[in-house]
Image: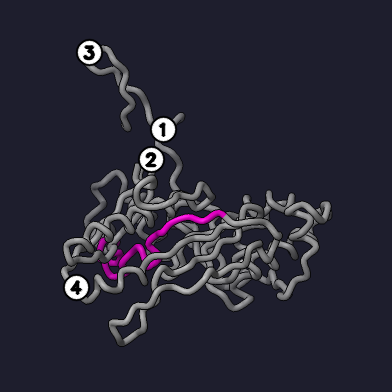
Amino acid sequence: MLWQVWGNALKRVYCHEFALRLLLSCVDSHANRHGRYIKPLFSYKADFYVRVFVQVIESQREVQKTTARRSYVYDCVGCHSFYLQKVGKHTPGTQHVAPGRGPPVGRSCEQCGKDFYIGGPIWSDPIHDTEFLSQMKEYVVNEGRYLGTEKRMTGMLTLAEEELPEVPLFYELSTLSKTIHSTCPPLTTFRSAILNAGYQVSLAHVCPKSIKTNAPPSVVWDVMRRWALDNGAKLREPDTVAGALLRKESTLQADFTLHPLAALDKYVLRFPPNPEPNWGPRLELVVNGNLNPVMI
C-alpha cells in the first residue's frame, strides 16, 4: 500500500486529507527523479476514493526546493493537537534550501501532557489552484445544466475554493467536544470565536464539521475550554486528558459574538446526502462464480 512505502499514515479525523497529501508527496517524489515537479490543480476526496489532478513541470531549479514542500506531522495522542515540521526550509529569492530545524514540539504536549504520533512526510503546500478552480466552476455553472450532478460539482468546487490554501489538515468539532466530555458547539459559534480572535477559519471539503484554521492549538483549546466551562462541563481528574485540558489556564478570552464571516451560504449544496440507502462498496458476482469486491 502507498503509506507503507511513501510515508507513515495517521488514523486521525483528517485521515482523508492526509491521504491526499501523502499521494501528492508520492507523485512529486516520482516526478523529481526525472527532473520535474508537480503543481496540484485540484485534489479531492469523494465517496470511497481520493483523486488528484496535477500539472507536471520540468525544472531542475524547482526540484531542488522539493523538501520545502513537505512536512512531518506531530499529532498529540491525547488531545488531537497537531503541529507540522518542514523537511526543508527555502530562503525566498535564492536557490538555497536548508534542512528543516525542529522538532516543533517538546517531549510532551503543552495542552494535555501526552506523547505524539509522528506521520508523513506529506505535501504541505496548497492542494488546489484557485484560478483552475474558478475556471472549472464557471464552466459547470454555464455548461453543466444538462448534468445530473451539477449541484454536487458546484458544491465541491465551492468548498475547495473556500479552503484555506496554506493550512494543511484540520480539527473536527465533535472530536474536540468528546475529548473534554462537553456538548458540541454550533459550527457558526466556534467559527465566530476563531475569527474574533484574529485568525482565519474555513471548512475542509472532506468533513462537514471541520475546523481548518491558522490558529495554533492553544487558541483552539482556549475557545473549546471556554465553551465547555460555560455549558456545564464537569472537571475530571487532573491526570486525565479532559481534566488537564479544562484545568489549564487560558491565555485568550474567547468571544462568541457572531462574526459576519462565520455563517455559510446555505444555498450552496456543500455536502450532499448519499444517493441511496446503504451507500458503499458492494460485491459483484463475476462469471466464474467468485465474489470480487468492486466499487459501484
Which class describes the residues within 10 Å of circle 3: few (<14), some (14-19), or many (20+)? few
Magenta stretch: give its range: 117-137
Say which quarter of the image contains residue 54: bottom left
Q: Upstream in the sequence, badge 3 or badge 2?
A: 2
Disc 2 and disc 1 in contact, CB within 8 angstroms: yes
Question: Which of 287/232 is in front?
Answer: 287
Does 120 appear in magenta? yes
Q: Position of residue 23 (x, y in %)?
A: 33, 53
Q: Upstream in the sequence, badge 2 or badge 1?
A: 2
Of labels 1 and 3, the one closer to you: 3
Of labels 4 and 1, the one closer to you: 4
Of labels 3 and 2, the one closer to you: 3
Of labels 4 and 2, the one closer to you: 4
Per the image, label 2 sits on a secondary structure element best described as loop
Question: Circle 3 is placed at which residue position?
Answer: 288
Q: CA distance from mark 3 to mark 2?
A: 26 Å
Question: Which of 36/193 is in front?
Answer: 36
Q: CA distance from mark 2 to mark 1?
A: 8 Å
Disc 1 and disc 3 in contact, CB within 8 angstroms: no
Say which quarter of the image contains residue 164: bottom left
Residue flagged by tag 1: what amino acid is it?
Gly
Q: Upstream in the sequence, badge 4 or badge 2?
A: 2
Q: CA distance from mark 4 to mark 2?
A: 36 Å
> Residue, x 38% and y 57% (percent of image)?
21
Label number found at residue 280: 1
